[in-house]
Structure formats: structure tokens, C-alpha cells
Image: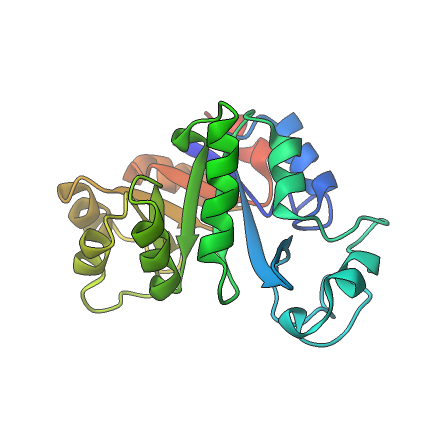
């Protein structure tokens, strides 16, 4: 079962910052999950549509200037990172799961991944995921070999058909809705199941028993110590 650091190790450091990512790596994660928006053709790593929860800024993330976003404190004096800075920080020590949050992110993300593959990285170093299946379709249209995961909440009708149509490798579902039946159904299609967000030790143990393939956690040490 893969241990995936959720927005880095956000139980310890400010989420989606380089500090949080460095902490997750130090705790021995297999993968790092982060979120991206496109702001003035720059990929910025932040989760929310609004800036106020995780920074000292305000307003819509996508409607601000890149310079303004970079001027903000994202916690403990950390900047909102760019996706390139995340790649440089991870430096192939873990898989990078890039969740497309904003619009018009697919092309920029694929271009950056391809730059790093040209430098010697592997497609296995990356996974692109989203609730926005239009953006995932764009990813596949530009580069069919990039690995993708579909994010679901609840049990949307036809999610397995959607996964197959998008040629996804992973179905990423919420802890609140994961069941043995769902895991069996996904595995029967030769797809993997990842579950978000699993922090409680009892839930971590349950996910192992259910044989899920990966879990997102704010506290990677709880997963690593129980393996």
C-alpha cells in the first residue's frame, strides 16, 4: 500500500509548500500529492479557489496576478510554490501526483512533465489526477502515455466506464465511500484504488485489510510505521 503525502505532510507543515513536501520526503513517503492552478500561464501549487484559508492574501486564486500570489505568505514564511519548484524539490525521490484544480492546467502540466522526461525523468515519476474529466481528457489528447487517475466523491454513475474511456490507471475515492465491493469492482477492471484522506490509525489498518493500493495521509509516519 503506497503512502501518499497529502499536500506534502500537511499535518506537520503548511500544506502545498516546499516545507511540507520536504517533511513528507523525510518521513519516507512513496508519493507526494499537490494541487495546481494556472495563473498567467504559471502553474502555482495551492488547493483552494480562494486565497484566504492558506495564505495572508484574499480573493480568487485564478483572478490574481502571479506576482501577487508569489508575494504572499503560505505559512511559516513559505511562498506559494510553482510546480517546477516542486519537481526540483522532489527530484525523483517519490512519485508526484499533480491534481488539476483550476481550468486550463492540462497543457501546461503536460509540457512541464515532458520537459523533465526529456531530462531523464520517467513517466512513472508522475500521475495526473482531477475531478475535472475534461482536463484529464486534454492530458490524454496531448500525451496518451501520461498516467492519470480519476477522482471521485461518492459513487458517481458510470465511474468505471469513465475511467476506461479516459484510459485511467487509478480510481481515487474518498475514505467516506470506500467499500470492499468498490475495491473489488475496480480491481476487476485491472485498475488501482487510492483512498483520501486517511489519518486515523484504525482507518489505516482497515485500508490495509481491504487491500487498497495507496492512501493519502496528512501524517505519513503513521502509515510508514504500520507497514
Instruction: Report the coloring of the rendering.
Output: rainbow
- Horizontal and vertical percent for residue 93? 56, 24
Q: Quadrant of the N terminus?
A: top left
Q: Is 90 or 25 nearer to us in this picture?
A: 90
The answer to whether residue 201 is seen in the rendering is: no
The answer to whether residue 134 is seen in the rendering is: yes
Does 128 sit left or right of 19 as displayed? left
Does 216 sit left or right of 142 as displayed? right
Q: Looking at the image, how many numbered discs can be counted on the residues?
A: 0
- Horizontal and vertical percent for residue 208? 36, 35
Does 10 sit left or right of 96 as displayed? right
- Horizontal and vertical percent for residue 206? 37, 41
Does 205 sit above or below residue 181? above
Does 186 sit above or below residue 102? above
Does 147 sit above or below residue 101? above
Q: Residue at x 31, y 44 (%)?
A: 193
Q: Residue at x 61, y 31 (%)?
A: 90
Q: Quadrant of the C terminus?
A: top left
- Horizontal and vertical percent for residue 44? 64, 55
Q: Residue at x 48, y 34 (%)?
A: 3
Does 3 sit left or right of 145 as displayed? right
Residue projecting furthest to the left:
188
Q: Which picture quadrant has residue 151?
A: bottom left
Q: Which picture quadrant has residue 143?
A: top left
Q: Is 198 or 66 nearer to us in this picture?
A: 66
Q: Is 69 or 117 nearer to us in this picture?
A: 117
Amino acid at each position: 500500500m503506497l503512502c501518499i503525502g497529502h499536500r506534502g505532510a500537511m499535518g506537520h507543515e503548511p500544506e502545498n509548500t516546499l516545507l511540507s513536501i520536504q517533511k513528507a520526503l523525510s518521513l519516507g513517503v512513496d508519493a507526494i500529492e499537490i494541487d495546481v492552478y494556472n495563473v498567467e500561464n504559471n502553474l502555482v501549487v495551492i488547493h483552494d479557489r480562494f486565497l484566504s484559508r492558506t495564505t495572508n492574501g484574499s480573493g480568487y486564486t485564478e483572478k490574481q496576478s502571479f506576482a501577487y500570489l508569489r508575494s504572499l505568505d503560505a505559512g511559516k514564511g513559505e511562498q506559494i510554490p510553482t510546480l517546477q519548484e516542486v519537481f526540483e524539490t522532489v527530484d525523483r525521490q517519490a512519485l508526484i501526483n499533480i491534481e488539476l484544480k483550476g481550468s486550463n492546467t492540462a497543457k501546461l502540466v503536460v509540457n512541464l512533465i515532458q520537459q523533465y522526461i526529456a531530462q531523464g525523468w520517467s513517466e512513472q515519476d508522475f500521475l495526473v489526477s482531477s475531478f475535472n474529466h475534461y482536463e484529464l481528457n486534454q492530458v490524454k489528447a496531448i500525451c496518451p502515455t501520461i498516467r492519470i487517475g480519476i477522482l471521485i466523491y461518492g459513487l458517481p454513475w458510470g465511474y468505471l466506464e469513465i475511467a476506461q474511456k479516459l484510459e485511467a490507471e487509478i480510481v481515487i475515492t474518498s475514505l467516506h465511500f470506500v467499500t470492499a465491493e468498490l475495491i473489488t469492482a475496480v480491481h476487476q477492471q485491472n485498475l488501482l484504488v487510492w483512498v483520501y484522506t486517511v489519518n486515523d490509525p484504525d482507518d489505516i489498518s482497515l485500508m490495509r485489510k481491504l487491500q487498497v493500493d495507496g492512501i493519502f495521509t496528512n501524517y505519513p509516519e503513521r502509515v510508514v510505521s504500520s507497514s
